[in-house]
Amino acid sequence: MYQIGLWMYLCAVAVLSLFDRKVRAMWRGERRAIGTIKSKLDPQAKYVWVHAASLGEFEQGRPIIEHIKQKYPQYKVLLTFFSPSGYEVRKDYEGADIICYLPLDTFRNARRFLNAIHPVCALFIKYEFWYNYLHILKHRGVPVYSVASIFRPDQIFFKWYGKGYGKVLKCFTHFYVQNEQSKQLLATLGIDNVSVTGDTRFDRVIAIAEQAQKIEAVERFLASNKGKKVFVAGSSWQPDEEIFIPYFKSHDNWTLIIAPHVIGEEHLRGIEALLERNGYSHQRYTELADAKATPVTGNGRNALIINCFGLLSSIYRYADVTYVGGGFGVSIHNLPEAAVWGKPVIFGPENSKFAEAQGLKACGGGIEITDYRTFSAIMDKFGTDAEYLAECSKAAHDYVESKAGATKAVISALNL
């Protein structure tokens, strides 16, 4: 059944690649991966293979990669992605020696890929359980580690119809999981080579915060809106924006910074139109980045739209309150990235699968909203109760700090 499903997927991707730019990039990248490896391979080197499905998984794996490069300089790193949203953003990442797409998990692809690279070990970040790759690695005696993985009862491995596919988990040398529930679930399958080490992404966001630089254009914008509280919305989608932007129509003691998840002209214009309907002047970051540009002043209600990548993690530092998008249907984005700065984080209701969302809610550093009414209520409280805002801010920071250390735990246990 797995092989049939794989070929059906392959056919679907081939068709979609004719119409969708991202799918076409992935399709071409997968087909060129073996050639990319052979052209860049150092035949005298030994390689550690790290696989991250997409950008989020890469951020979890990045601390591991950088610790390997530091602690084990005798090894080189091959980094693979499945999704264009990961590869296209990080294809020039300097921490890896070779970066490419992972060819689809057919037996032929897996064998050719592994014959080309001959990894000394493989690390799969969070998810990704490719049947053929994993079985060939096990057959060849290559250690395979699952890092920052998390398991839930609704996953196929724990259903009666998924027991056969669940055998793929037996291919792993060791699991470094995020929580105790994951360890207990794996135990029901007779898997006990498991350590609870936590989520390496917390180490990553702490490192980002420590290395973050001030952003001159943002500081000029905020200086022109001095005396107002700052609301930073990161990775927002239209459903998020339609909730939080209207609130500020009657609360002009706030300045807005909006960093949408999709930076396309259509989405940017939609944000701008929504801001205008609610009495806000606006400016795009790329316009303000010119040192000679003057921050928008308008009628005193001003918003800065971040229309480029790579700044959000540092921009959260300027907030009094943060909002992380994706919780109204897509999937919630990087909550620790905001919380690490000691800022309360607001997010939507689709968060049950994210341990960090549950942890932030439990400690008071994160607040779930379901609609405009609940958003308005919490923002009113933040705007009028300074003590409550301070308590939530501290709770968010302390939560992230308490989760640090997963990277060192994994690195110290790897048998390299």
Image: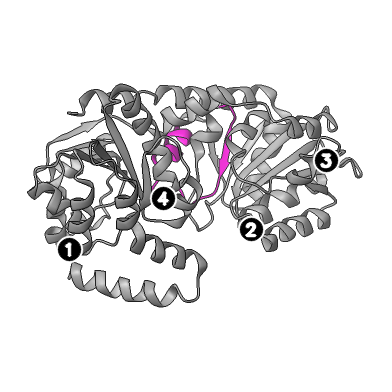
For residue 302, what is the image quadrant?
top right
Between marks 1 and 4, how big is the CA–CA gap?
22 Å
Q: Is residue 218 above or below residue 99?
A: above
Where is residue 257 drawn, in percent x and y?
Answer: 71, 41
Q: Element under label 2?
A: helix
Where is residue 104 drawn, in percent x and y?
Answer: 29, 62
**First in sequence: mark 3 or mark 4?**
4
The amino acid at mark 1 is Phe
Of circles 4 and 2, which is in front?
A: 4
Residues shaded magenta: 341-362
Q: Mark on residue 238?
A: 2
Tag 1 residue:
107
Q: Residues within 10 Å of mark 2 (few under 14, many from 20)?
A: some
The amino acid at mark 3 is Asp
Between marks 3 and 4, how big is the CA–CA gap?
38 Å
**First in sequence: mark 1 or mark 2?**
1
Tag 4 residue:
54
